[in-house]
Structures are given as C-alpha cells and as structure tokens.
Image (cartoon, helix red, strand yellow):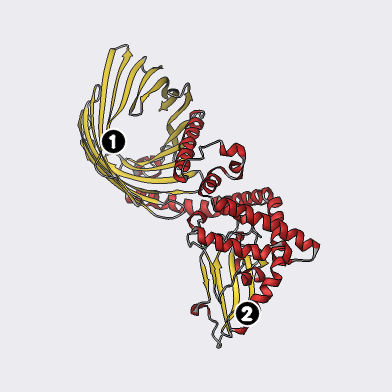
C-alpha cells in the first residue's frame, strides 16, 4: 500500500530503487536521495508563474508527506496495513507505538483471521447435489431382426432415477453449528426422502464432536454420534457410530478412520466399518500441484476390491485435468477415463467414460457451479460395444467445443467487458484527478528536462525521442479496437540520469507524470530513443523492469 500511497504523489519510481517493486525494501539512503531529487524538481520557489507555483506546492507537499511516512519504519508498517487512515491519531491507537513493524503485521494478521472466521460463521454455506440418471441403452442394444418391429423405429431414452440433496449450516455460537440436510430419491417409480439435523461443537483446537438425528419414509429414525480428534500434528482419527431404527429392529453401525501425513503431499488412511456392510479399507492419497494419485484396497462383505486412479493437472488458466482409474473386485472390473475444465469463474465441467464388466458402458457428466453439483450419469449399453465407447468419448468432446465457441466464450467475453466497464466507471473520478496531477507534473518538469537534454546531447548520451504508455493494438484481428495511449516522453526523459534509465518491476502508472489511460486493460510502454547517435526502440510490459540503453534495442540501418 505504500506503493499506492506514493503513486498518488508521483514518487513511486524515485522512492523505489529496488527491483522487486516493494517500497519497504528500499534503504534510508536511497529514500533520502530520491526525496532530495523530487524536492528540487517540485520546489515552489523555482516557478514564477502563479498557476505553476500553486501546482508545484501541492506536489511538493505530497512528496514531503510520503517521505515522512516512508522514513519511519513504524509509520510505514502501519500504512501498509491500515492505509492512510491508520496514520491519523485514531489509527495510532490500533497498535502500541513500541511494537516493531513485524509485530504490527503479525497483530494485523491475527485480527484479520478473527474477522474472517466471524464472517464465515455468519454464512449458511449451502451445498446441494442434483443427480439425474438417464437410460439410453436403446440406442445401442438392438433387438434381433425378428423383433425389429417391436417398439417402433425411434430409440427410447428415459430418465430412470433422480436424486436431490441439500444442506445448510447455521452458526449458533463461536463453537456451535447446526447443520440441516435433506434428500429425495426415486428409481424406476419408487422413491423416498429423509431429513437430518446435526449439532456440531468445537471442543478444542484439536477436535470437535457431532450429534445427528434423522428420519425418513424408507428408513426409520436415525441416531448418530461423530467425533474428530487431532492426536498429533500429523495424525488424526475420526470415529462414528449410529443406530438405525426400523420395523426389522435396531441396526447398529460403527466406522473408524485413522489418517496420517506420510509426507507434505501424501496421506495414508485406514478405515474399519462394522454393521450392515462390514469392511476394512486402506488407501494412500498423494496430491501435488501437478497430479493426484490414489491407491485403495478393501476387504469386506459384500464388496471387496482394489482401485488405482491418477489425475494430471495442467498448469493453465482453465485448470484442465485429465484422469483415469481402474477398479477390480468381486463385482467385476471397471475402467474409467475423463477430463474436467473450468468454463467460467465459478463453474467446472467434467465428463467421464466408464467401461466395465458386467456394468457395460456409461457416460457421466458433472457440472460444479459454486457449491452446487449437477450430475448426469447416462447408461449407454449393458455390453462393451466399440460404437458405444467411441460415441461416449468423442460425443462430449465435440459438444463441448461447440458450446465453448457458441456460448461459453461469448458469455465470458461479455462478462469481462461488463466488469471492465464497471471498474472504469467506479474509478473515473480518481483517474481524472490523476490525469490532472500528471499534466501538472509534466509542466513542472519542462525546465529540468531541458537541462537534462542539453547535458545528454553534449555527451552523446540518452535522448528520449518518443514514449507512449497504454494499450497498443498490434493484432490485425483487433483492428476495430482503439488504441488508448498517453505521451510520456517528458516524464521519461526526466528520469534519465547519467545516460541511464532504470524502471523497476512495478506498474508504470505510478511514475511521475504518468496515469492509467485504460483501467483494467493490459498496458505497455513503447520507447523510441537515441544513444550515441544511434536509434533504439523497445516495447516493455506494464510491470516488467526496464533498463536502457541496451544493445538489443538498436534499430539496424538496413531495416
């Protein structure tokens, strides 16, 4: 924030000689040298014109105010954390003056964490799932020729099952939370529903406990208890027991999970379940930035299996992932492969093809929208048919590419344009003020720039011939867009010292005499300069460091 504070008074580049672009890393000597240079540039006594004198006095006061903050480590730390308001008398009361900058930042992070926790407690955190099962086996499983006339020639596709579930959380106190959930299901005309209420209490920093009550029309009342506990920083245990009441009597169930961090990216799990479907399960999960691997093995009644899955994560903006898995057990063998991709800011779309014996071929489409999940399992055939596998693989890909071109990209583009327009409208008054200050600074620089040019010409040094900052349109496909640039020749020449110009890794809109001509859009700095009588040219990104002159910038005479 110190950077934004100083950009208001046009001193970012001078008070920030560090390449990182972080003001608080500059030494006191560097800050003092930059302060003296700006004072010489904006001193009111150097200007006789009343209007220039008034503008110089305003900029001179801003430079002095910024320097007073940056020279004091405590004031600088308070401004970085609390902003300009923190520098007032009331702001100083937030923390003790005797604290070091590190202690001030630590205190702020603690308070920030507490505020974040309170904010999260006020949210209901709704979660929901809608699943629609589709039976499309009539597309591939055809009758023999003797029965071709049965049912007509149009394949029959139907919805054979549906499931809807929803849950919300309601914080009661800082330690207590109520969770209400419900579900409705139907399969081939038969269905039912249930509702559950859970009360969770955080007993300590190491664990919590939960009591659950439930009821439904297909199953009787449910009473459950769940406990979570961190035994060590790398080891935790979860225990759950329940009593299901029905017309057949009381059916108890117990589940225990032991988990341990094997290393930074790997977890090991051991699960034991006793009840209607007793089993023992062990699994290893490794999750890194680029991949996710799972291996699981279960011994149980009636399901015993071994499973292995791998997921590769592409390092792109769309968070693309491809995955594959193999699962084999007493029930048969299933091979699955698929992919998922982020299609908007809050939406992720995925598709998985499942091929197995005796299950057949299925296509599973899943859409995650914020905390809501929409799941569409499509059963294609009871047999393993090459045609079903082909269409299940190629069909979703073609469909996605079509939707991407016709719907998703136009929608995202329109959304970005709308957000950009809102951002520009909200910052219009601020940009107008920055523009006025930049123009005033350029007028005050004229005399200094004249002397710098004379000095550089006498030594055949660095002369800035033309410099433009803003949005350049170089792509032929974007010719309809209008370039949005400002002339920054004078401000850049003013920064030249000893035939060198050095800009650090920070946005250039905060440089003296600069302002942002296109808020929210990608910007560049284009410079045409002369050094040793030879023409040079360079195009630099907004936040890229720049150092001139350079041999690589030279314009060949042949071109």
- Point out the residue furthest to the left here: 299
Q: Which residue is mark 1?
A: 233
| Residue at x-position 47% and y-position 24% | 171
Residue 455 is tagged as 2
Residue closer to the observer: 233 or 214: 233
- Examine the rendered structure and indicate whether residue 272 appears above or below residue 310: above
| The C terminus, quarter of image | bottom right
Q: Quadrant of residue 436?
A: bottom right
User: Which mark sits nearer the N-terminus, 1 or 2?
Assistant: 1
Residue closer to the observer: 108 or 359: 108
- Point out the residue furthest to the right here: 50
Q: Residue 32 location, x and y as percent? A: 55, 60
Where disc 2 sits, the SS reads helix
Q: Characterize the local packing of mark 2: few (<14), some (14-19) or many (20 or more) Cα atoms within 10 angstroms.
A: some
470 vs 283, left or right, is: right
| Residue at x-position 49% and y-position 49% | 343
| Residue at x-position 57% and y-position 39% | 92
Q: Residue 384 location, x and y as percent? A: 30, 46
- Examine the rendered structure and indicate whether residue 468 appears above or below residue 431: below
Residue 8 seen: no
Q: Characterize the local packing of mark 1: few (<14), some (14-19) or many (20 or more) Cα atoms within 10 angstroms.
A: few
| Residue at x-position 51% and y-position 40% | 97
């Amino acid at each position: 924030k110190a950077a934004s504070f100083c950009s208001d008074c046009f001193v970012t580049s001078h008070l920030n000689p560090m390449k990182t672009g972080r003001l608080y890393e500059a030494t006191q000597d560097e800050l003092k040298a930059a302060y003296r240079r700006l004072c010489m540039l904006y001193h009111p006594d150097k200007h006789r014109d009343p209007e220039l004198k008034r503008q110089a006095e305003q900029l001179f006061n801003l430079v002095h105010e910024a320097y007073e903050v940056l020279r004091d480590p405590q004031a600088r730390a308070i401004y970085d954390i609390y902003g300009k308001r923190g520098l007032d008398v009331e702001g100083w009361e937030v923390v003790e003056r005797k604290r070091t900058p590190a202690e001030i930042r630590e205190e702020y992070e603690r308070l920030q964490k507490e505020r974040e926790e309170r904010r999260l407690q006020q949210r209901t955190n709704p979660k929901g799932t809608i699943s629609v099962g589709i039976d499309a086996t009539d597309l591939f499983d055809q009758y023999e020729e003797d029965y071709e006339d049965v049912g007509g020639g149009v394949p029959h596709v139907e919805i054979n099952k549906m499931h809807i579930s929803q849950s919300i959380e309601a914080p009661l106190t800082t330690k207590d939370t109520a969770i209400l959930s419900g579900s409705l299901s139907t399969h081939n005309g038969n269905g039912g529903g249930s509702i559950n209420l859970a009360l969770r209490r955080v007993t300590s920093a190491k664990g919590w406990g939960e009591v659950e009550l439930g009821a439904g029309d297909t199953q009787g009342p449910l009473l459950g208890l769940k406990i979570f506990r961190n035994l060590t920083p790398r080891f935790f245990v979860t225990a759950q027991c329940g009593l299901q009441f029905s017309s057949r009597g009381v059916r108890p169930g117990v589940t225990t999970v032991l988990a341990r961090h094997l290393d930074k990216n790997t977890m090991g799990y051991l699960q034991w379940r006793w009840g209607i479907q007793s089993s023992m399960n062990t699994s290893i999960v490794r999750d890194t930035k680029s991949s996710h691997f799972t291996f699981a093995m279960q011994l149980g009644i009636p399901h015993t299996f071994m499973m292995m899955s791998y997921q590769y994560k592409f390092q792109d903006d769309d968070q693309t992932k491809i995955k594959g898995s193999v699962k084999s057990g007493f029930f048969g063998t299933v091979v699955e492969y698929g992919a998922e991709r982020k299609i908007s800011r809050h939406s992720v779309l995925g598709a998985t093809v499942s091929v197995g014996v005796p299950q057949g071929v299925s296509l599973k489409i899943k859409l995650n929208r914020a905390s809501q999940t929409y799941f569409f399992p499509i059963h294609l055939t009871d047999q393993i048919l090459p045609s079903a596998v082909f269409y299940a693989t190629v069909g979703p890909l073609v469909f996605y590419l079509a939707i991407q071109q016709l719907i998703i990209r136009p929608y995202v583009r329109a959304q970005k344009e709308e957000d950009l327009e809102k951002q520009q409208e909200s910052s219009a008054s601020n940009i107008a003020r920055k523009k006025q200050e930049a123009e005033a600074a350029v007028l005050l620089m004229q005399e200094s720039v004249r002397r710098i040019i004379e000095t550089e010409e006498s030594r055949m040094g660095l002369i800035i011939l033309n410099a433009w900052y803003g949005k350049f349109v170089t792509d032929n496909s974007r010719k309809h867009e209008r370039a949005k640039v400002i002339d920054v020749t004078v401000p850049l020449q003013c920064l030249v010292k000893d035939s060198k110009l050095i800009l650090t890794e920070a946005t250039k809109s905060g440089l003296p005499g600069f302002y942002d001509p296109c808020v929210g859009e990608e910007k560049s700095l284009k410079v045409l300069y002369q050094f040793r009588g030879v023409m040079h040219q360079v195009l630099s990104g907004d936040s890229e460091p720049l150092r001139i002159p350079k041999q690589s910038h030279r314009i060949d005479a042949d071109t």
